[in-house]
Image (tube, rainbow, N blue to C red):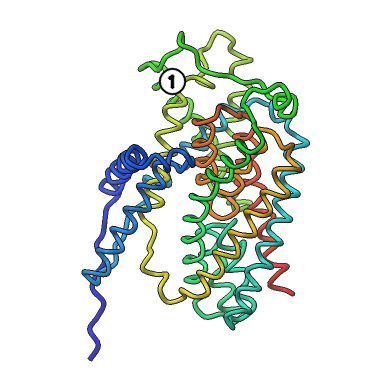
């Protein structure tokens, strides 16, 4: 009589959050120990998270018990982070970046088509049902784990692809790893090959964005951090209310999207209505909250990857990720970078594009953050990419998946 599976090792929310902080410091130590990681702009949460995920895999293989993380705090940090992005956004920058936003959306849709075509090729190479192509494409890569989980049952039940959700989750996991290590080196290659410099006159004209940098007279302070947290919470409250209303109307969007938009709304109305009110946008205090949220979120995301689930489909997964990474890198080098202007902004955006086309929006932001910390700021990139990856992509992807499944 077969033995029942052993119960998983459960890591509660508090322990997972604490471990996420530790994982970040492991990544810092790795970057100090191996300068190549910093040289190629590999974010600390990524290196620390991957090492921890491998350690967790060792625990699973040695004990025969899966490891389960409660990621409630991670999901909260994601909302926190995108709300800070909204609070830093200015409508003047969005208006000036309008044409670039439209171009970027078109490029993203083209990339999505290539990604699903590549997934179909991989499925055919391994004799997998052709409808599994979307699970090896945008449903898992640009869409991420959430989209893979949502579409897996549909592909399995309506198109007869057994284990579609598991295949999609595994693809999304490997895609996250590829996205984390591809963006930084790509941007470094483009910046150094073309001699690009942040703040160059040509780049500012191309971006049309003003650069706001913290000054020595505006240091991190207790008042500044609490002020930032207060307005983050106000924006989240507005975003949550809008999210509930959208759900009631049948519109499904991730919670962080209305929170991002609420942050933009507040940051472009409150300072104009109350000119003497201190506002947290572009302050070191808000930047600190933003960086903490992103760093711990990404560390928790990487450390909690269930690598032990990949073995059953190793061949098709390995083929898919290699092909998808080559397609994404080629598309970025020969299409995204040239079309977006061949300047520093385009190079930073390329790092972000690698992050969200193969992984997720936070990975894209982490890639761009690592690049800008090394080479200099590019404010508009941090506005355009989240709007594309967090808002427009989810809508376009739903139509793209339906279309490919109907072929």
Residue 155: % across, % down: 59, 74
> Is residue 92 at all visible to an observer of this figure?
no
How many labels, in total?
A: 1
**Compared to 145, does 318 lie above or below?**
below
> Image point 59% across, 42% down: which residue?
189
Residue 93: % across, % down: 69, 26
> Image point 59% across, 83% down: which residue?
127
Q: Nearer the viewer, residue 172 or 14?
A: 172
Q: Based on the displayed image, in which of its 4 quarters is residue 21 positioned?
A: top left
Residue 148: % across, % down: 54, 64
Outermost residue toward the bottom in this view? 1
Figure quadrant of the C terminus: bottom right
Q: Nearer the viewer, residue 114 or 238?
A: 114
Q: Nearer the viewer, residue 316 or 275?
A: 316
Disc 1 is placed on an element classified as helix
Residue 244 as seen in the image, left or right of residue 200: left
Residue 268 as seen in the image, left or right of residue 12: right
> Is residue 157 at all visible to an observer of this figure?
yes
Residue 306: % across, % down: 38, 63
Residue highlighted by disc 1: 227
Residue 198 as seen in the image, left or right of residue 173: right
Residue 106 as seen in the image, left or right of residue 384: right
């Amino acid at each position: 009589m077969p033995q029942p599976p052993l119960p998983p090792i459960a890591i509660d929310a508090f322990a997972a959050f604490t471990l996420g902080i530790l994982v970040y410091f492991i990544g810092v130590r790795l970057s100090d120990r191996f300068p190549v990681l910093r040289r190629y702009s590999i974010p600390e949460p990524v290196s620390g998270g991957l090492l921890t995920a491998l350690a967790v895999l060792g625990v699973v293989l040695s004990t025969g018990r899966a490891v389960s993380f409660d990621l409630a705090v991670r999901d909260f940090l994601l909302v926190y982070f995108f709300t800070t992005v909204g609070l830093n956004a200015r409508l003047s920058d969005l208006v000036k970046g309008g044409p670039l936003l439209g171009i970027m959306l078109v490029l993203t849709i083209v990339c999505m088509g290539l990604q699903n075509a590549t997934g179909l090729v991989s499925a055919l190479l391994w004799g997998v049902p052709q409808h599994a192509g979307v699970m090896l494409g945008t449903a898992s890569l640009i869409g991420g784990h959430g989209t893979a989980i949502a579409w897996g049952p549909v592909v399995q039940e309506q198109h007869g692809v057994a284990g579609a959700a598991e295949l999609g989750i595994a693809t999304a996991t490997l895609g996250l790893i590829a996205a984390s290590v591809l963006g930084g080196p790509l941007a470094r290659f483009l910046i150094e090959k073309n001699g690009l410099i942040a703040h160059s006159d040509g780049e500012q004209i191309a971006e049309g964005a003003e650069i706001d940098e913290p000054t020595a007279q505006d240091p991190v302070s207790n008042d500044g951090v609490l002020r930032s947290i207060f307005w983050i919470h106000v924006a989240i409250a507005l975003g949550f209310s809008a999210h509930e209303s959208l759900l009631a109307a049948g519109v499904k969007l991730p919670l962080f999207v209305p929170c991002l938009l609420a942050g933009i709304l507040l940051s472009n109305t409150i300072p104009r209505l109350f000119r003497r009110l201190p506002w947290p946008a572009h302050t070191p205090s808000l930047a600190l909250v933003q960086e903490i949220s992103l760093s711990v979120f990404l560390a928790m995301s990487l450390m909690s990857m269930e690598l032990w689930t990949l073995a059953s489909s190793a061949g098709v997964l390995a083929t898919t990720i290699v092909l998808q990474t080559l397609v994404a890198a080629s598309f970025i080098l020969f299409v995204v970078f040239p079309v977006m202007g061949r300047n520093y902004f385009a190079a930073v955006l390329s790092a972000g594009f690698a992050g969200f086309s193969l992984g997720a929006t936070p990975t894209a932001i982490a890639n761009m953050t690592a690049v800008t910390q090394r080479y200099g700021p590019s404010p508009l990139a941090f506005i355009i990419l989240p709007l594309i990856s967090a808002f427009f992509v989810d809508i376009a992807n739903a139509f793209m998946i339906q279309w490919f499944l109907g072929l």
